[in-house]
Amino acid sequence: MKDNKAILPIAVIMASVILGGFFYAIQINKQRSIERQQQIKLTDDKRIEEVRLAQEKKEYVAKRRSECYDIEQRERITFNNVVDHFYREEDDVCFVHYKTDDYNGYTKEECREEFGMTPEGLDCELGQFSKRY
């Protein structure tokens, strides 16, 4: 009889431990699944943000190139010596180039000697000057 009294509590405790272990294993699995989903979402959000930033940069550069062209066109209306324009994305600067007689008489070598390999030296060689916008 003594053995029968001890069997029931032991069986209840064993069943509780087994059920508890299964419940714990299920919860661990759910937690890992949730963490994987969160990591995937973070990765996707980061990729979406990178794409959005790249698109914004492309749109900004296109806008600045258009503005640079518009500046050149306005300058052409005002001055008859406008040669062309150039937008340098790295510095976010627009250059408008104008023809000039200031460098008449300079040879290519004299331009390089006086100005070196600089934008001013190139302007001298081409017989032009540039304004930044």
Image (tube, rainbow, N blue to C red):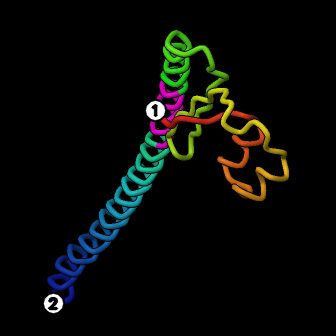
Return the x and y of residue 95 as percentages of the image width and height.
56, 34
Residue 20 highlighted magenta (yes or no)? no
Residue 17 picture quarter: bottom left
Q: Residue at x 56, y 40 (%)?
A: 89
Return the x and y of residue 130 as percentages of the image width and height.
59, 36
Of all residues, the one furthest to the top in this rendering is 77
Q: Residue at x 52, y 9 (%)?
A: 77
Q: Amino acid at mark 1?
A: Glu
Q: Which mark is residue 56?
A: 1
Residue in the foreground of this view, choosing between 124 and 12? 124
Q: Secondary structure at mark 1?
A: helix
Q: Secondary structure at mark 2?
A: helix
- State the predominant SS element of the stretch in magenta: helix
Is 103 left or right of 88, judged from the image as shown? right
Return the x and y of residue 109 as percentages of the image width and height.
85, 52
Q: Which mark is residue 113?
A: none
Residue in the foreground of this view, choosing between 36 and 49? 49
Residue 51 highlighted magenta (yes or no)? yes
Residue 76 picture quarter: top right
The magenta segment is 50-64
Residue mark closest to the camera, 1 vs 2: 1
Which residue has dot 2 on it? 2
Is 49 left or right of 13, judged from the image as shown? right
Q: Quadrant of the N terminus?
A: bottom left
